[in-house]
Amino acid sequence: MNYFESTPHAATDYLQEKKQRIELFANDHEFRELSKKWRAMALERKYMNNFSWLGRPMIQLPMDCIAMQELIWNLKPDLIIETGVAHGGSVILSASMLQLLGHGEVIGIDIDIRAHNRKAIEDHPFGNRVKLIEGSSVDPDIIKRVKKIADGKNKILVFLDSNHTHEHVLSELRAYGPLVSIDSYVVVFDTFVEDLSDEFKWTDRPWGKGNNPRTAVWEWLKQNENFESDRSIEDKLLITSAPDGFLRRIN
C-alpha cells in the first residue's frame, strides 16, 4: 500500500486523489487499530477535555470538530439541533459556522444548563444564533417545542451528544431523526464506547459495552431505511468518537 504513489498525469484532480486515499484508509487495518488504541488512551487521560471553540470549552476530539465544520459548511443548514450543551463549545462552533454562512440558528438542549454557562453562551458574539432549552431531550414537551421551531426549515442537521445509554439515544434518534432533511445528517457521538476493551469500566456513567450510542444506532438503522451510516467520514478521520455514527438521510 503506497499513499504517495504518483499518477501518470501531474494535474490529478485533488478531490479524486483524496477520495482514493480515504478508500485506502478503509482497509488499512494497521492504521485503524493504532487509531483505536490511541483513542482509548486519550479517553483514559481525558485528552478531549483540553480544547475550546472561540473561548468556550468543548469536550470533543479535534478531528470530530473538523468533521462538524465540514458538514455545516457543505450542508448550509437552516437549523442545527444539538443535544448536550455542557460548557457550550459545540453550540458556539455551530453558531460561528452559521454566522459565516450568513443564516441559520442552533438549538442546544440539555437537562442542566448552569447559569454561568448560559450567560457565557448568550453573551458570546455568536450567541444570538443559539436558542438554549433546558430539559430532557426525550421529554415529549421538549420534542414538541423543537418540532415547532423546525417547522418550515428546509435543511436540518442534528448532533446527539447527551446521555449515552442505549435507550436514551434510541429515543433521541426516533424523535429527531425524522426532522433531518434528505442528504443531511444526524451525527451520534461516543459510539466508540462499544470498541473499548472489556477491562475498561465506567465508574460514574450508566453506559458501557452493549448499552451505548452505537448499539442504539445499530438497532435504529435496522428499523429505518431512510438512513445509512456514511463510513467515508469515519474512514477520513480514523480517530473519531463516532464510528458508525455519521448517519446520512437518503430517503
Image: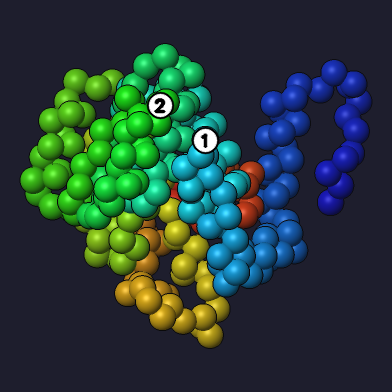
Nearest the eye: 56 or 226: 56
Q: Residue at x 31, y 39 (%)?
A: 119
Q: Which residue is mark 2?
A: 126
Name of the residue lying farthest toward the bottom: 199
Left or right of residue 153: residue 6: right
Rendered position, 128 above or below 138: above
| Label 1 secondary element | loop
Query: Quick check: marks 1 and 2 in contact, CB under 8 Å?
Result: yes
Check disc 2: other Cα within 10 Å, few if <14, some if 14-19, many if 20+. some
* Kind of residue at disc 2: Phe
Q: Position of residue 32 (x, y in %)?
A: 68, 60
Left or right of residue 104: residue 191 = right
Residue topped by disc 1: 54
Q: Earlier in the sequence, mark 1 or mark 2?
A: 1
- Residue 123 location (% of width, % of height): 35, 31
The image shows residue 249 at horizontal and vertical percentages of 36, 37
Q: Which residue does the image show at 19% across and 20% down from the upper left?
A: 152
Tell me if I can see residue 240 in this picture: no
| Left or right of 136, for residue 36 | right
